[in-house]
Image: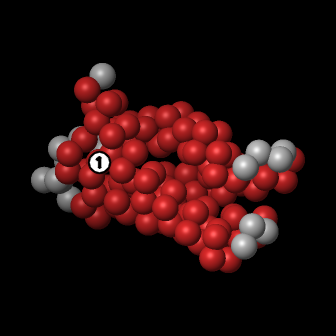
Amino acid sequence: MVTFLKAQGAAIIGSLADFLIYVTLVQLTGHTRGMISLATAEGALCGGIINFIIVRKWVFNEGQKKAHIQVTRYLLVWAGSILLNTWGMYLITYFTTIDYAIAKRIFVSVLVGVFYNYFLQKRFVFK
């Protein structure tokens, strides 16, 4: 349970970076579906880098193992996460009138973070 809570703390920090970049880019580029999807991917990129560093060193204490294997595995999981986040945002903004910021935080990030990222990081990336 402690590992899960630490992972969620790391996810919150990565998500804050992701969210700040996402909102900033949407505000600067416009609220079109294409720009929202691009901003989602850009935010996820920055948040993912921050998350990897924190998760590797603090959550799973894997800083002593070879990073290249972990990075390769993380990139595979991360690519799936970016696709799920990007497509999730596109679908929600296309089929609903939910505000983009609420959709990002509540519907997409939480679902992908808890049900995809955590389990694959624990069982595949940092095993």
From this viewpoint, which residue is outermost toward the top?
1
Q: What residue is at 55 percent from the left and 38 percent from the top? A: 110
Q: Residue at x 43, y 38 (%)?
A: 118
Expressed as whole percent of the image width and height from the top left, the position of residue 54 reads 27, 52
Outermost residue, right direction?
95
The answer to which image quadrant residue 38 occupies is bottom right
- Please tell me whether mark 1 sits on a helix, a strand or a loop: helix
Q: Residue at x 44, y 35 (%)?
A: 119
Q: Is residue 18 left or right of residue 86?
A: left
- Furthest toward the left, the residue is 64
Q: What crowding class fits label 1: few (fewer than 14 Cα within 10 Å), some (14-19), or many (20 or more)?
A: many
Residue marked by disc 1: 55
Q: In the figure, 124 relative to 30: above or below?
A: above
Query: Quadrant where the N terminus lies?
Result: top left
* Colouring convention used in this rendered image of the protein: secondary structure
**Which residue, as the protein is rendered here, is positioned at the far bottom?**
29
Residue 14, placed above or below residue 60 = below
Q: Quadrant of the C terminus?
A: top left
Quarter assignment of residue 46: bottom left
Q: Position of residue 65 (x, y in %)?
A: 17, 53
Residue 122 vs residue 92, the one in the foreground: 92
Disc count in the image? Answer: 1
* Side of 34 where 9 appears, left or right: left
Residue at 29% from the left image edge and 48% from the top image edge? 55
Q: Is residue 2 left or right of residue 45?
A: left
**Looking at the image, can residue 108 be seen?**
no
Q: Is residue 59 visible?
A: yes
Instruction: List x then y, in percent, for residue 49.
Output: 37, 63
Measured as percent of width and height from the top left, residue 74 is found at: 40, 55
Q: What amino acid is at disc 1?
A: Val
